[in-house]
Image (cartoon, helix red, strand yellow):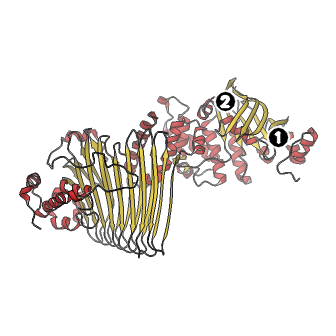
């Protein structure tokens, strides 16, 4: 197929301004041309279709005012990448990793220096560009991101900490892509912080692809704190080869509306995904979280644990999808989704969905939407703690399984502070 | 000196009347014991005083220093000076024991005068050593995975750290072996003094060998039917509850009595 660059002056001028490789620009155009035939993805019980979730702003390169970073609390880490809007503003410790053959670079650098590697993995194994309208819009409008490549037999023990700061001081959409590739027998730990500066009404379309090669192990943790006026599509997907393992721990602490689409494809035999999600919804926000694990290979293990709290007039929906494909013999799909309601005006939903196409498997689910345990509250209050403080303590325990999996004490503390803030805000609004 | 007065207290749970007019007055500096057979309302009395939402007071008053506390929420009763060592303490994952106890102490202090961490840890260490508790118990999640004995010790640890005016100990001896019983008693005895009063609920006289009460009350059928000194507990041990009942001519069926 020949692609007519000239027909797309906006893409052409952007591509020239960043000097991206031709294949990538061609892919943008293919994605753009595919859009009329594509629809928005459908997630059970999550009605987001009328939100301003579609990327509409022109593809444009812009720089952010680095003073904006001063508003943020950035924790020091051994390996650190900080991006503000489309700019990389700090990198630390990466040279040391480079000596081990580990590639960590921002999107422009990746396209410039590792074009072949990026082409091999970008929207090829985990997510496809023409899967739906949102993935197609993503490819057509992508302007920032991170590329991580861990060669075989390489172990990176200390986590790479990233801060991706969406700049909402101007009305620019945020389209961001992360690829993490771990080759055979490697180990990698990653801690992502998504956050917003500014309060313009904006759209974020973020895709993270983790391609875990044979016998590799990825620990993926994230703390997502996107702003009140940011409407987000956040897709994180793992592609796991033989005996690969991904541990996902995600803290959804956003203040705006968001659809989280968290998937693991257990393609290789013996591959294993543990997905832990905590979420707090406050104000009038809606958070819809659709977590799927698909067992394709034999003896694969997919576990989902989702705990969430809803306050004020907010909504939180957890879908847990365990799909065992025919032939995935000896596989295991388990899930637990629980929502605690602190307000009578809040809406919560926990939907277990098990799709089982093979007999020789084990599967189970638990789901509940309920109130704070009265015996626990009574106990704490009987020691003199006011009801709201007691509630927050019970909730912290309820969210504990994910907190404990955060690979940095400092970030865990930060997350506790964020949880406390969200809960206090939500409680005053009851 | 503080006083705790229970006046004509009637309490029901799920529509069933359990307490049928309990009267009891105690002062700080005193240890009272309530003894009685199973199913007689001893735990109901303690939960009603503390304010468990499932227990409904249908009549009567509980006065702390002359003020009725029954309209206060649980946490305010606690801050006013009441403490209940529970028979089945709740488990709270994610919140460490130390953090919780510090929070409970600070809930009683002005916001700008929180206890210093150093001071707190010193007190905590000392108190835990009185109770033969290992240091790691401070960092474990509140009661989570604790054995029965560990939970009881932890209740006494909280009691000693919080220093209430009045502590109700609801069957603190149940499920304890003799060594643990001695340890727990040591903790309670250390609290004895003019500013502390305790109401000890138990079936057995054994605990009262270690914590010698000033007053013993016998409860049956939702009322206090007899009062006396420590010798009353010994008499109960010898004669059983049926003996007292028959002597008083009460028409009460004991739950564990054969038909």
Quadrant location of the N terminus of chain B in the rendered image: top right
Structural crowding at the residue carrying mark 1, measured as other residues with C-alpha within 10 Å and reported as few (<14), some (14–19) or many (≥20): many
Between B135 and A101, which is closer to the camera in this rendering? A101
Label 2 packing within 10 angstroms: few (<14), some (14-19), many (20+): some
> Residue B257 location, x and y as percent?
86, 51
Residue A314 drawn at (x, y percent): 41, 42
Q: Residue at x 28, y 61 (%)?
A: A209
Residue indicated by mark 2: B70
Give the image quarter of residue B234: top right
> As displayed, is residue A236 above or below residue A298?
above
Q: Chain of mark 2?
A: B
Which residue is rendered at x = 63% and y = 39% of the image?
A: B160
Indicate the secondary structure of the residue bearing disc 1.
loop
Q: Give the answer, above or below, for where B46 lies relative to A87.
A: above
- Residue designated by label 1: B221
Residue A321: where, in percent of width, then height? 42, 61
């Amino acid at each position: 197929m020949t692609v007519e660059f000239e027909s797309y002056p906006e893409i052409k001028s952007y591509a020239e301004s960043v000097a991206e490789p031709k294949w990538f620009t061609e892919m943008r155009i293919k994605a753009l041309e595919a859009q009329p035939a594509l629809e928005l993805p459908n997630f059970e019980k999550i009605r987001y279709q009328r939100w301003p979730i579609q990327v509409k702003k022109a593809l444009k390169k812009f720089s952010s005012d680095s003073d904006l970073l001063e508003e943020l609390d950035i924790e020091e880490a051994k390996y650190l990448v900080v991006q503000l809007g489309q700019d990389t503003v700090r990198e630390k410790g990466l040279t040391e990793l480079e000596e081990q053959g580990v590639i960590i670079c921002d999107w422009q650098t990746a396209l410039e220096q590792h074009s072949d590697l990026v082409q091999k993995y970008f929207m090829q194994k985990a997510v496809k560009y023409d899967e739906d309208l949102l993935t197609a819009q993503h490819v057509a409008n992508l302007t920032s991101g991170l590329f991580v490549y861990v060669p075989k037999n390489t172990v990176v023990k200390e986590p790479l900490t990233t801060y991706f700061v969406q700049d909402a001081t101007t009305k620019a959409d945020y389209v961001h892509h992360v690829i993490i590739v771990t080759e055979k027998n490697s180990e990698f730990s990653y801690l992502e912080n998504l956050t917003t500066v500014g309060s313009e009404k904006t759209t974020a379309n973020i895709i993270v692809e983790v391609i875990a090669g044979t016998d590799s192990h990825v620990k993926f943790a994230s703390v997502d704190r996107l702003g009140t006026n940011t409407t987000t599509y956040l897709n994180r997907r793992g592609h796991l080869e033989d005996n690969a393992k991904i541990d996902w721990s995600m803290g959804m602490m956003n203040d705006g509306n968001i659809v989280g689409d968290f998937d693991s494809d257990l393609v290789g035999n013996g591959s294993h995904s543990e997905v832990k999600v905590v979420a707090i919804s406050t104000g009038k926000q809606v958070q819809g979280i659709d977590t799927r694990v698909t067992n394709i290979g034999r003896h694969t293990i997919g576990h989902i644990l989702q705990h969430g709290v809803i306050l004020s007039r907010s909504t939180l929906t957890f879908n847990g999808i365990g799909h065992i494909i025919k032939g995935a013999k000896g596989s295991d799909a388990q899930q637990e989704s629980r929502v605690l309601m602190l307000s009578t005006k809040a809406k919560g939903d926990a939907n277990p969905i098990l799709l089982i196409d093979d007999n020789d498997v084990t599967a189970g689910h638990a789901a509940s939407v309920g109130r704070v345990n009265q015996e626990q509250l009574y106990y704490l209050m009987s020691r003199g703690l006011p009801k709201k403080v007691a509630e927050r303590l019970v909730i912290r325990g309820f969210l504990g399984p994910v907190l404990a999996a955060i690979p940095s004490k400092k970030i865990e503390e930060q997350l506790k502070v964020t949880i406390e803030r969200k809960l206090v805000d939500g409680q005053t609004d009851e | 000196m503080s006083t705790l007065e229970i006046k004509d207290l009637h309490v029901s749970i799920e529509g069933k009347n359990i307490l049928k007019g309990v009267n009891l007055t105690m002062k700080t500096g005193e240890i009272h014991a309530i003894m009685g057979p199973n199913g007689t309302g001893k735990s109901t009395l303690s939960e009603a005083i503390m304010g468990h939402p499932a227990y409904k007071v249908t009549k009567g008053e509980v006065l702390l220093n002359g003020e009725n506390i029954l309209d206060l929420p649980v946490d305010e009763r606690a801050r006013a000076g009441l403490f209940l060592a529970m028979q089945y303490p709740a488990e709270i994952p994610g919140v460490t024991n130390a953090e919780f106890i510090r929070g409970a102490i600070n809930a009683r202090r002005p916001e700008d005068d929180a206890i210093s961490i150093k001071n707190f840890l010193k007190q905590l260490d000392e108190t835990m050593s009185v109770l033969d508790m290992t240091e790691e118990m401070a960092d474990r999640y509140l009661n989570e995975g604790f054995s029965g004995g560990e939970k009881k010790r932890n209740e006494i640890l909280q009691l000693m750290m919080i220093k209430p005016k009045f502590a109700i100990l609801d069957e603190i001896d149940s499920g304890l072996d003799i060594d643990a019983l001695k340890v727990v008693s040591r903790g309670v005895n250390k609290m004895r003094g003019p500013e502390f009063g305790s109401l000890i609920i138990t079936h057995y006289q054994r605990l009262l060998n270690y914590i010698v009460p000033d007053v013993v009350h016998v409860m049956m059928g939702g009322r206090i039917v007899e009062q006396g000194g420590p010798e009353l507990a010994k008499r109960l041990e010898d004669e059983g509850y049926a003996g007292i009942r028959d002597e008083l001519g009460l028409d009460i069926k004991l739950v564990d009595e054969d038909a």
